[in-house]
Image (spheres, rainbow, N blue to C red):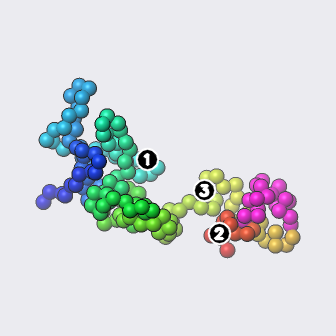
Amino acid sequence: MEDEFRPVGGYPGYRVSRDGRVESCWTRRGRLCIPTEAWHPLKPILRDGYPTVNLARAGKKTACKIHRLVLAAFVGPCPPGLVACHGDGERANNDLSNLRWDTPRANSEDSLRHGTMVRGSRCGASKLTEDDVVQIRRLRGEGVSTGELARRYGVTRKNIEAIVSRRSWRHLS
């Protein structure tokens, strides 16, 4: 049985399968690109960790994430306010059974459940560790000023205030 492919909306000459394979019927003849009867697979590249293919329309290339192409072809266009979500947290798993349109909040909850959300000291820009934050909250509770804590930990007073009021580092008790 041949795999089911569906056309990629808005990009003539391209099609996508349920498991995330993208094919093209375009071929080069000198400087021209012309459609042929033969289909050939496109090689995905990783962008932000997501398999992506470059699709051309009217001479202009566009990078398209494969999971969005699969959902658009087999489920329908993305409803307003929703995003493409991977059920297992694996960005490379673009099988239709693993994908859905859902809210950004549900996508974040998935990231927490899968352990793929970067927060706390795992964030590359973080100057503090989880132990630092617990210590800051304890010391502020004992009366140490926000200015003193800011100097001690090399952050701003606003950062200390956000930590103490739990506007940041909320995931720590």
Q: Which numbered disc, 3 or 2, marks the residue that appears first in the sequence?
A: 3
- Nearer the observer, 24 or 152: 24
Q: Looking at numbered disc 1 in the image, what kind of residue is underneath it? A: Arg
Residue of label 2: 170
- Nearer the observer, 80 or 4: 80
Name the mark nearer the viewer: 3 or 2. 2
Which quarter of the figure has residue 142? bottom right
Q: Residue at x 76, y 64 (%)?
A: 161
The tag on residue 123 is: 3
Residue of label 1: 47
Q: Which numbered disc, 1 or 2, marks the residue that appears first in the sequence?
A: 1
Q: Which numbered disc, 3 or 1, marks the residue that appears first in the sequence?
A: 1
Q: Is residue 156 magenta?
A: yes
Q: Secondary structure at mark 1?
A: strand
Q: Is residue 117 magenta?
A: no
In percent of width and height, residue 128 lies at: 70, 58
Q: Looking at numbered disc 2 in the image, what kind of residue is underneath it? A: Arg
Residue 90 appears in the picture as rendered: no
Q: Are marks 3 and 2 in contact (CB under 8 Å)?
A: no
24 relative position to 84: left or right: left
Badge 3, how many Cα within 10 Å: few under 14, some, many 20+? few
Q: Residue at x 72, y 65 (%)?
A: 163
Which SS does the magenta portion mostly show?
helix
Residue 8 appears in the picture as rendered: yes
The segment highlighted magenta reads 144-163
Q: CA distance from mark 3 to mark 2?
A: 14 Å
Badge 1, how many Cα within 10 Å: few under 14, some, many 20+? few
